[in-house]
Amino acid sequence: MNVRTWLRCFVALLITASSTLSPLANAADEEITPAELAAIRAAEEARITAISNVYGSVVAIYGNDRKGGGSGVLYDPAGYALTNHHVVAGAGVDGWAGLADGLLYRWKLIGTDPGGDVAIIQLEAKEKGKKFPIAPLADSERVRVGDWAMAMGNPFVLAEDQRPTVTLGIVSGVHRFQAGSGLNQLVYGNCIQVDSSINPGNSGGPLFNLHGEVIGINGRGSFEERGRVNVGLGYAISANQVRNFIPELLSTKLAQHGTLDAQFANRLGGVICQSVNLDSPAAKAGLELSDRLVSFEGVKIADANQFTNIVSTYPAGWPVTFTVEKEGKNQRTITVRLTSLPYEPIVKEQPKIQPVPEEKKSEDKKPDDKKPEEKPAEKKPEEKPAEKPAEPTAAQEEKKSEEKKDEEKKEEPKNDKPADKPDVPKNPMPQIKMPPAKPDFGKAGEVRNKKLNETIARELAGWWQATSRESSSSESDGLSIASDIFRQQEKVGTQSMHISSEGGILVSYEIDGKQTRVGYDGKVYWLQSGDNASQEVTTAKAHRDPHFAQAVVLCGLLQPEIWQAAGKLSLAGSDKAAGRLCYRLELTDADSEELCVWLSVVNEQLQPQIQLVKTGVGIDDDEPIASTIYRQWKRAGNYDLPTERVLVRKLAEVEQLRIVTTQIATLSPAKAIFQTPKKAD
């Protein structure tokens, strides 16, 4: 649509909005063609349809007193909704939520991010199995200045019937930065600026594009001294930043943001490192003073503010790759995990105030026994008569007598206060005016609710299991998978894997002529190298073998309850694997060692699709044991299985070996193959 046609459409919209413009209407009708008018009406219908599709996903959020409140948006049918941290900071860890169906639902806090002003709550369904209406998250990097933007929410608590208010505007700016309040809190990095009306109460509500996709979470407006009324400057946290933090929040953490622990500035025509903590992972990996930052996470860096914007969208512990150079040469690529930015003590555990006993207080203040005797001398009302004029009149004496009585009455509460309260406990609470109680969000970076964390982790694992197998079919009790092993293009060995629905596992592989067998019979883990006798090993040692770890995770597809014997399941939070945003699950064994499982929950088009991405026992760059990346998924019988598994090392995921499946067959019940080999006579 060219500029002239767009102006015609805009004029037509003005015509339909006001019947008082009849002269203008007649003139406009002569210029607008039937085809253009049809396009206008089609655009209007599309906008109304988009609003209708997501109208039920917008949440009005209240505290337990059902006063005040903010907004939110449901993004998962299980009742998970996004909102602002400052909304839950005011409402508490639970409360009431209203939807467009006119009903109120109980909600509870899952996790919150004070740094980026995002939180996740969960609404409790009134009927078991109820699925809530949702709105999908968009790719906010595709948002452009001039795009239409619809803000929805509950401004000024107008939605008494719980139906949200809708305002329409345009995107005024992208990649904006708004400084926070306090230390590293409520920072809006890489955010979206809009002129859509965002007022008090809109906080936490969704910012939609015209396709009904969430491009951001509304959070703040430049109200200044204008009576907290919108002036056309609103800011929304980008959907991509929100998506990066969802796994952290679902782990029930008080999430933290990441930092390289280095500062960059615009100097000498580039973005130069001007300070770096020598103990930071970045410095230990090779970042030096005066290094020029060339790229960060695949984005060419032209400005120091651009870098600050990008890094603010990642959680602590996120693996990042960046390239630096010295004076235009000696270019180096570094991969490290971001360290955490601290918060103010306000989000940490409040120190306990120890009351001081009254007896000690009096002894400390009055060590000299003479001081109490001098106290009566401090009262000087009795000296006043010497200053009075001689021979006062009777009226003056009466008046002064009454004034003296009044003064004594005023002084009585102070003098008699200790005597009036004989039942005061020996160790009373300190007489300090304490601030209002704040919600308990837990300690920064730590899981707040382990039981809820495990429940959510099992939901994720169960989702992967359910979508990777046919629930109505159980033709086999196990699978047998044969594969070839390659180093680059050269075949260097073979691998055979046997897994059972009862949990039995046997993996045999030969690499460069060296043979290894690792098994589990449902009770005992065992290992056999070459012709040596087999030996019983711990769960942790078995899981350290990347070939066996592959079988452990894939065996979960066959089991009635996924990963029954592998360890206690938990959600560690957000992570990146194979270049994709992942939920990192951890299976912790009796020796407190973890087998990590990385799952992605969206495909390249950002549509919901859960998939196994990676497994391994270490997450640090110096981990000596290889991890496994899973590729080339295909349906084999009743299961979706990876036909290519790549052993990688370090955070950069440098390829070591490639395992390519050649055959998949069903495995008949034969428990004997999983048992520890008997010693030869």
Image (cartoon, grey):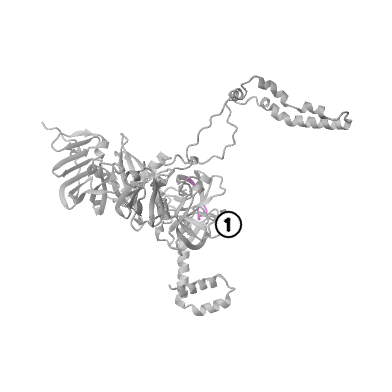
x and y, in percent, of residue 464 in the image: 32, 49
Residue 500: tell me if it is visible. Answer: no
Residue at image coords 52%, 51%: 70
Which region shows up in magenta? 99-108
Q: Quadrant of the N terminus?
A: bottom left
Question: What SS does tag 1 mark?
Answer: loop
Q: What residue is shown with label 1?
A: 229
**545 displayed left or right of 374:** left
**182 displayed left or right of 572:** right
Residue 113: tell me if it is visible. Answer: yes
Q: Nearer the viewer, residue 26 or 372?
A: 372
x and y, in percent, of residue 426 in the image: 59, 24
Would you say residue 102 sits in the magenta stretch? yes
Residue at image coords 74%, 32%: 410
Up the image or down, 175 lies above or below 557; here it is: below
Q: Nearer the viewer, residue 84 or 444?
A: 444
Quarter of the image holding residue 278?
Answer: top left
Residue at image coords 18%, 40%: 517
Q: Quadrant of the C terminus?
A: top left
x and y, in percent, of residue 163 in the image: 52, 56
x and y, in percent, of residue 552 in the image: 26, 42
Residue at image coords 35%, 50%: 291
Q: Residues within 10 Å of mark 1 (few under 14, many from 20)?
A: some
For badge 1, the amino acid type reads Val
Query: How many marks can you see?
Result: 1
**570 displayed left or right of 45:** left
